[in-house]
Structure formats: structure tokens, C-alpha cells
């Protein structure tokens, strides 16, 4: 597979041009990568514009992911999430309200997208909630929620995989959406690599219409590199509006290092990387079995490239760090590890050695007893209204104005415009928040 961006950047780095253009480092190596870090010099073109190099590279990516079109982001999935919401809201059929029916475990970028685009969410809550990160919505529950709305929404939005590796039933959810003429949007930030597993678990292949992947999270791509995929099923209007939607929210200074990295990754994905990914998935499954034999409780049936241990995450993470392993995420109920072909078998062995036998006292996960809160005003109204920061002890009954979401997992406990009740405050406290932004009272 061709690598036009990577080739161009390398050629430019080797050409010894006097760089009387941005960036100010002029290609002089301080970190080491500066010679490759270019800008829109002659021949490179604009990311959302006329670049022949990027057009060819994106077409390569689209072929690899089986999309109708794939766009690049150097600002992560956060940018793509805003573009997805914008597309769904602006291209909704006449008479459709600016509403997105969304599973509640959204990343904070979705909430900022609502504020920026003036959309409103109707939230889907799971039947039981064991983690802020997870929100299981069976297709039957989605059908019921869709049919209960006065009019079909502009879109349905799910996060899959979630931070714990849970996978939504995309075939079932997309069937429920498509039967009602509603597009399904998937935040697949954590699942770019799912495309290359056997069977393929990528949301686009399973029925999603628009989908974002943080390539940098699971593929050998520099931080910030992400894809916005459009399904070939989408109406033409989505294809003509997609670049404009990305450009609306994006910087005019994309990282060409990251673009070169996305481009270089295409060649790996067309070559040995998928085989390596499948090998990693198998090795992780063996590690799960080994850990289960050692008494550890693991979440099963989710993202094959993620290993999620149930138990006091902080304690498990400390044990891993002592053994020379840095986990991806730990909270009071779970510890999450992410693997890729970049991890040799010795890293996985190190996990098993660091954890040893599970001698931790048994612990029940703390249930999240959050009832759907009262909505006082729209997300947009709350985000743009005068605000103040108050300690949690003084926040009961006040209206949330910020997006309280520690990162990771950056899943908001409450959303701007919602009244803060005892449940929300208890959860904020449990997650280490001390204060919260609220609307000023008139
Ligand atoms: C579920 C989810 N969606 C979106 C994002 C944003 O992705 P990025 O960091 O690539 O902007 C994240 C980031 O962690 C995430 O966890």
C-alpha cells in the first residue's frame, strides 16, 4: 500500500530546504522528530482541502476500514465526535427535533458537541449501573426508547467499546435504528483495532453509520491521530458535508507528524499488523485464563485486546506498578490493561508475575445508584450561562454548569443543565471531586 504523506515528509526532511516558514523549530532536532514536523509547504496541501497526498492516503484508509469515506483528525476522536454530532444534527430530516438519543456513558467531547451544536440529548440509562464507564443498552430497550419519543431523533449515539472493554450489540442496535430511519453513531475511540480481528468487531462493519476511532489508542499511530468513518450507506449529503464539519471544529495547524503516522500505519495494516493483532488477542486470552486460575475475576466477552480485572483498581494498579507494569486505567472497581503487538510476550508474563495469586479480600463492586436527574435547561444554555464554583457540600439542588469528568475515563457524572441531587454529589465525592461548577442564582 502506498504511503504518500510519509514519503513526502521524509523527502522534505532530507531536502535541506532553508525553512523560512512555520514551525519555529525550523527542523532543528531538539526532541529528535523536528525535521519531520512540517506545515502546509508547497505540495503538502491542506488537511481539509485540496491535498492530493492526503486524499490518496485517506482512500487507502477507507479501503482498509471498508468505509464509504474516512477522514483524518490530528486532534483525536474528540474532534470527530463534534463533527459526527454536527452532521447528524444539521442533516436531520425536516421536522426532526435536534435530539440525539444517547447511552449515558458518553465521553465529555459529546457533551461539548451538544453545547456547540445546540443539540439536546435524551439519555439512555442501563438497567443496572456498575460503573460510570459502562452503559449496556439491549436492542429491545433501544426500540422501546425510540418508540416512546414523540418523533424520531436525529441520531442514536453509543460508546463501544467502553473504557472497560464492553461491546455494544451494534448489529441489534443498528437494526432498531435503521427500521426507523435513524442513523447510528458509534464512539469507537477505543476500537480501531477491532477491524482487524477475526471475527471483525468494528462498529462500521456491524451496522454503524458514522463512527470515530482514535487510531492512536490501539494502533501504532502518534497521539492525536484518529479517523472519522462514513458508512457507504449514508446519503450523499453526509459525504459532501463531512470535511466542512471537521474543519469547523479543527485547528488550522494539524500535526504533519501525526498525519505521516496515520499514513504509515496504513501500510502496516495492509501488511503484517492484522496478523500480529490476532496473535496478541490470543496471547491475552491465555493471560486471562492464567489469571483466572490464580483467582482473579476478569470481565469476559468484550474487546479481545483489553484485559479488565474486577476488584479494587488502586490496589491492583499498585501491585502492577511494583512489578514494572503501568496499567491504562484504574478506579475503585476495575483495573484495565490494553495490549497491542507492540507488547512482547514478556510484558504479558510480567502482568501475571506482578499479580501472582489473588489474595485480596473479596469486594463487592459499589453500585452506582444514580437516578436520571432533573433537567432544568439545555446543555447549551447552561454551558454559556454565568457560573460559579462551589464546594460539593453547598451544591445540593444547584444546576450543573460544567462537565465534571476526570480523565480517564472522562465520562461526566452530570451534564450541564441538570440539577445536582444526592446521588450525583455522592458519586462526585467518591470520584475525588471537591467542588463543582454551577449556574449562578439570580
Ligand atoms: C470513549 C472515548 N471517546 C472519545 C475519546 C476522545 O478521544 P481522543 O483522546 O482521541 O480525542 C476518548 C478518550 O479517551 C474516549 O475514552
Image: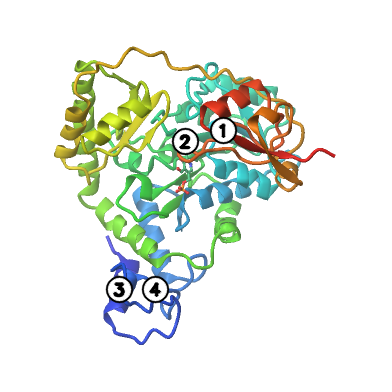
For mark 2, give the secondary structure: loop
Q: Spatial distance from mark 3 to mark 2, Cα to Cα?
A: 45 Å
Mark sitting earlier along the chain (3/4): 3
The C terminus sits in image quarter:
top right
Q: Does the numbered disc 3 mark a residue whose Cβ is under 8 Å from ligand 1? A: no
The disc placed on residue 178 is 1
Taking depth in this image into account, of 227 and 147 the one nearest to the observer is: 227
Query: What residue is shown with label 3?
Result: 29
Q: Spatial distance from mark 3 to mark 1, Cα to Cα?
A: 52 Å
Name the front one of labels 3 and 1: 3
Task: Tell me whether the residue at label 4 lies in contact with that at label 1, contact meaning CB atoms closer than 8 angstroms.
Answer: no
Q: Spatial distance from mark 4 to mark 1, Cα to Cα?
A: 43 Å
Mark sitting earlier along the chain (3/1): 3
Q: Going 31% across and 56% down the picture, which residue do you hit? A: 266
Q: Position of residue 75 (x, y in %)?
A: 48, 56
For mark 4, give the secondary structure: loop
Mark sitting earlier along the chain (2/1): 1
Please say whether residue 235 is visible from this viewpoint.
no
Task: Tell me whether the residue at label 2 lies in contact with that at label 1, contact meaning CB atoms closer than 8 angstroms.
Answer: yes
Please say whether residue 78 is visible from this viewpoint.
yes
Query: What residue is shown with label 2?
Result: 207
Mark 2 surroundings: few (<14), some (14-19) or many (≥20) residues within 10 A:
many
Taking depth in this image into account, of 268 and 166 the one nearest to the observer is: 166
Name the front one of labels 4 and 2: 4
Query: What residue is shown with label 4?
Result: 38
Mark 4 surroundings: few (<14), some (14-19) or many (≥20) residues within 10 A:
many
Mark 1 surroundings: few (<14), some (14-19) or many (≥20) residues within 10 A:
some
Amino acid at each position: 500500500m502506498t504511503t504518500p504523506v510519509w514519503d513526502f515528509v521524509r523527502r522534505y526532511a532530507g531536502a535541506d530546504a532553508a525553512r523560512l516558514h512555520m514551525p519555529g523549530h525550523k527542523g532543528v532536532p531538539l526532541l529528535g522528530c523536528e525535521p519531520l514536523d512540517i506545515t502546509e509547504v508547497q505540495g503538502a496541501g491542506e488537511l481539509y482541502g485540496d491535498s492530493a497526498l492526503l486524499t490518496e492516503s485517506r482512500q487507502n484508509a477507507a479501503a482498509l476500514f471498508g468505509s464509504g469515506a474516512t477522514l483524518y483528525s490530528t486532534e483525536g476522536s474528540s474532534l470527530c465526535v463534534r463533527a459526527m454530532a454536527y452532521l447528524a444534527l444539521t442533516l436531520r430530516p425536516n421536522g426532526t427535533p435536534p435530539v440525539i438519543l444517547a447511552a449515558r456513558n458518553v465521553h465529555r467531547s459529546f457533551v461539548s458537541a451538544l453545547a456547540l451544536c445546540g443539540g439536546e440529548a435524551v439519555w439512555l440509562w442501563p438497567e443496572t449501573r456498575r460503573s460510570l464507564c459502562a452503559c449496556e443498552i439491549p436492542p429491545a430497550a433501544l426500540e422501546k426508547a425510540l418508540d416512546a419519543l414523540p418523533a424520531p431523533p436525529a441520531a442514536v449515539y453509543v460508546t463501544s467499546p467502553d473504557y472497560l472493554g464492553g461491546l455494544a450489540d451494534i448489529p441489534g442496535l443498528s437494526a432498531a435504528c435503521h427500521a426507523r430511519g435513524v442513523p447510528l453513531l458509534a464512539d469507537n475511540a477505543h476500537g480501531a483495532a477491532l477491524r482487524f480481528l477475526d471475527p471483525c468487531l468494528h462498529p462500521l462493519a456491524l451496522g454503524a453509520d458514522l463512527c470515530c476511532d482514535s487510531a492512536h489508542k490501539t494502533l501504532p499511530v502518534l497521539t492525536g491521530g484518529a479517523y472519522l468513518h462514513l458508512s457507504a450507506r449514508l446519503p450523499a449529503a453526509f459525504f459532501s458535508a463531512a470535511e466542512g464539519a471537521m474543519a469547523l471544529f479543527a485547528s488550522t495547524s494539524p500535526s504533519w507528524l501525526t498525519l505521516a503516522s496515520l499514513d504509515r500505519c496504513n501500510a502496516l495494516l495492509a501488511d503484517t499488523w492484522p496478523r500480529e493483532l490476532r496473535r496478541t488477542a490470543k496471547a491475552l486470552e491465555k493471560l486471562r485464563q492464567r489469571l483466572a486460575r490464580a483467582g482473579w475475576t476478569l470481565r469476559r466477552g468484550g474487546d479481545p485486546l483489553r484485559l479488565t480485572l474486577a476488584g479494587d483498581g488502586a490496589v491492583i494498579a499498585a501491585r502492577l506498578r511494583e512489578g514494572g507494569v503501568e496499567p491504562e486505567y484504574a478506579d475503585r472497581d476495575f483495573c484495565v490493561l490494553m495490549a497491542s503487538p507492540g507488547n512482547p510476550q514478556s510484558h504479558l508474563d510480567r502482568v501475571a508475575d506482578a499479580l501472582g495469586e489473588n489474595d485480596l479480600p473479596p469486594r463487592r463492586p459499589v453500585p452506582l445508584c444514580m437516578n436520571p436527574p432533573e433537567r432544568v435547561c439545555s446543555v447549551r444554555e447552561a454551558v454559556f450561562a454565568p457560573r460559579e464554583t462551589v464546594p460539593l457540600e453547598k451544591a445540593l439542588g444547584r444546576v450543573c454548569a460544567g462537565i465534571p469528568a476526570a480523565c480517564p475515563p472522562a465520562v461526566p457524572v452530570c451534564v450541564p443543565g441538570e440539577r445536582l441531587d444526592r446521588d450525583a454529589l455522592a458519586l462526585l465525592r467518591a470520584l475525588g471531586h471537591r467542588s463543582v461548577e454551577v449556574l449562578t442564582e439570580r
